[in-house]
Image (cartoon, coloured by chain):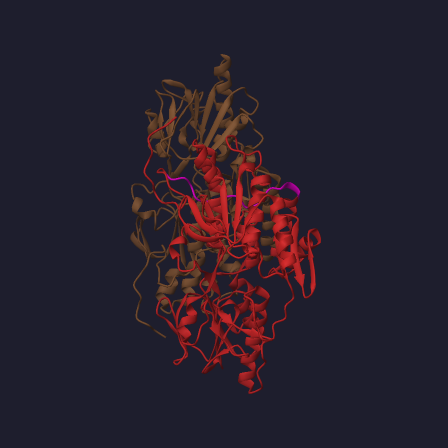
Chain colours: A red, B brown
Amino acid sequence: MHHVVIIGCGFGGLAAARELARADVRITLIDRSNHHLFQPLLYQVATAGLSAPAISAPIRSILADQRNLTSLMAAVTDIDVNGKAVTLEDGTRIDYDYLVVAAGSTHSYFGHDEWAPLAPGLKTLEDAFDIRRRILMAFEYAERETDPAKRAEWLTFTVIGAGATGVEMAGTLIEIARHTLSGEFRKIDPHAARVVLLEGSERVLGAYPADLSEKARLQLQKLGVDVRTSSRVTDIDAECVRYTDAAGEQRLASRTVIWSAGVAASPLGKALGVPLDRAGRVQVSPELTIAGHPEVFVIGDLAAAISDGKPVPGVSPAAKQMGRVAGRNILHRIAGTALESFQYRDYGSLATIGRKAAIAMVGKFKFSGYAAWLFWLFVHVYFLIGFRNRMLVMSDWAWAYMTFKRSARVISTLVPDHPVDANGERKPVEAARD
Amino acid sequence: MHHVVIIGCGFGGLAAARELARADVRITLIDRSNHHLFQPLLYQVATAGLSAPAISAPIRSILADQRNLTSLMAAVTDIDVNGKAVTLEDGTRIDYDYLVVAAGSTHSYFGHDEWAPLAPGLKTLEDAFDIRRRILMAFEYAERETDPAKRAEWLTFTVIGAGATGVEMAGTLIEIARHTLSGEFRKIDPHAARVVLLEGSERVLGAYPADLSEKARLQLQKLGVDVRTSSRVTDIDAECVRYTDAAGEQRLASRTVIWSAGVAASPLGKALGVPLDRAGRVQVSPELTIAGHPEVFVIGDLAAAISDGKPVPGVSPAAKQMGRVAGRNILHRIAGTALESFQYRDYGSLATIGRKAAIAMVGKFKFSGYAAWLFWLFVHVYFLIGFRNRMLVMSDWAWAYMTFKRSARVISTLVPDHPVDANGERKPVEAARD
């Protein structure tokens, strides 16, 4: 029986696994987490609007009934395409007949990895918890801060990168400051919080047509977000962000910075020994295989796939479609029948901005505002995995909508007996002051 | 206006704060976390049955409307009873006219603090997440383990201490192994998991009458828990627990150990400079004040209070009642009226064992089994803070009861590129093996 190894249980890997559900193959699915994550809603965990279990499900639970599949919680550290085996973090080698590499992407800091601890990105639940903690702690630090300048720094939130994630984070941060925390502090007024959205290009949501970009910018500004385009970040430290715009070098005093400006493919791409593009993505054939190894498929964010002459975007629906095609192509190879070429079906794009607005683009049909937002809600709930998650998310959102309260504000870290900075690093005690 | 400082927002501190809601005082409530925790249900987070937001609520949210109260997320590191001030972790001093110390308790390892990283206790959300991760990872490691002896070690769970928490953890662990994870693994059968409950004294649930203890033991054994009383732990390492029983020294190979055998009062008790009992609890007057300082009240788990000649137990209802009396006594002091003596009203005790049984004792009325379990459910949901939390917990439990699925199984930690042991510490890579 042929052994199919799938690396990664995101949208791509999961789709490939399910496509082979009734096939006469043996499947090993390897992921370094124990859960499948519904990434489009990860920013809601980061902004305390949803709890982690609402947008994720244990892999074993999802695939328990697929008897031809074994899942392993492990990290793949190397791929031997000639020996047809993958290596796990403890040295175990697993042989394969067919391999689907769906290891996804991670953050890119454009060569400035030293920014990573200061400006976390949002890709995993750990990222979301970290960002959530920083956001909530910023208000706590502001409440205790006696120096007005420092207090203003704690109440200034910077989001770098105005793609969908950045726009969603910025809109939600404003909602937290204006509504959720309203009335809960005594020394500060959360309304005084500023949210600055920095974008290097000229438009927010650059992947959308210019008129929708403009609508998004206006909606953000109406919410109170300070949108600064054509602003390229040059440095980040614990107290400020430096960037360059048309007027020259600028300094923005801000102690909470969130990164959503760059994505890089998983380092596993390098292990395949084939050409990569500038973002580290693997060049694949129309059938989603790599050069010289028709038994190895690369899908999702890790793949630089082309469809109808255009690059396939790194979005969830594309990953799912690629996963299904990879699965079917494995069966074609086994049966000796012709493989499919991957054809990306663009079902549209959605981005939400705050609690009642969004922009949406489905084919040539563009809309924005409240109707787009309802559509966004519906689509995201529909595509969640599992009835229970849908119920949970809908009830959390109904509650939040009615009360402005956010459901998942609890942070588990405690204040230790010594002072720490925003990264949790110990800092020297200042002189006692009343 | 008099300034009341309250240290701790557990059951005691929160009750004291609320008692003063309409008083003409200024209150500062200090807690090192941002939330109030419903501790009786913490073991459910530890066993992946509930998410953290279901049993906790942000302090600011609970007390937003109490205008005479400011809350601070900070750690109190010292108390100057003569200078009437508390010191925070960053050196800030806060003066008070009245002080309520409700800092609670922590784990005690009977002088063996080196056991703490190996055998976590369950007091905070961080503890619960840690335990949950260890439990779920134990099954993951077992699935990957090729050596049958090591696999059995991964599938052996030890709970030390058969008080209510230990009994509840043991009963739930069995449920996880027998039901929740059933069918989800391919190389191991989770049913093969063993749960051993070690208790130094002769009975489980020693605080209950002997006949209820016996019923609890039988229910545990019926569920499949290996109950070993008169077993005193002498050593714990990463692979086993050593203990002494009537037959002599014993060695139990187990890689997941949970500690619920000892409680110690918060170290803040020492800062008060008054006599402490053996567990570090502060001796208090009948009015809950300390010797020489009638403006300082100590309540909850930190207090060694006496009522009707008997020690007041360290349980949530007692802490609440003490909080209310401390609050009222502060008002008496301000008004110059007579203080109340604390009278503990024992409304009964409950402990649940697995999914359908419990034991309960209300005054002289004792009952067990399914009726006790329903009562336990009702009481816990009723006393939760907040309508929304009640809805969440009831829906989570209804789901779990119908499906045996546990709602909060997602762990956020990922497998890193190097192998780690159960504590997350890096370990050397073994030779590659197929």
Rendered residue at 31%/44% (across/down)? B113
Residue B388 appears in view: yes
Q: Where residue A91 sits: x, y (%)?
A: 35, 69
A254 lies above or below A14: above
Residue toward you, B114 or A330 = A330
Residue found 43% across the figure and 51% down from its top: B131
- Residue B182 placed where, x, y %? 52, 63
**Quadrant of residue B96 within the rendered picture:** top left
* Quadrant occupied by the C terminus of chain B: bottom left
Specify whether A167 is left or right of A282.
Answer: right
Would residue A79 be counted in the magenta stretch?
no
The residue furthest bottom is: A336
In the image, A202 versus A41, the foreground residue is: A202
User: Which one is nearer the viewer's eye here, A130 or A170?
Assistant: A170
Q: Residue at x 53, y 37 (%)?
A: B361
Between residues B336 and B115, which one lies in front from this camera angle?
B336
In magenta, the rendered stretch is A402-416
Residue A406 can be seen, yes or no: no
The image shows residue A117 at horizontal and vertical percentages of: 40, 51
* Rendering coords of residue B50 (x, y %): 53, 49
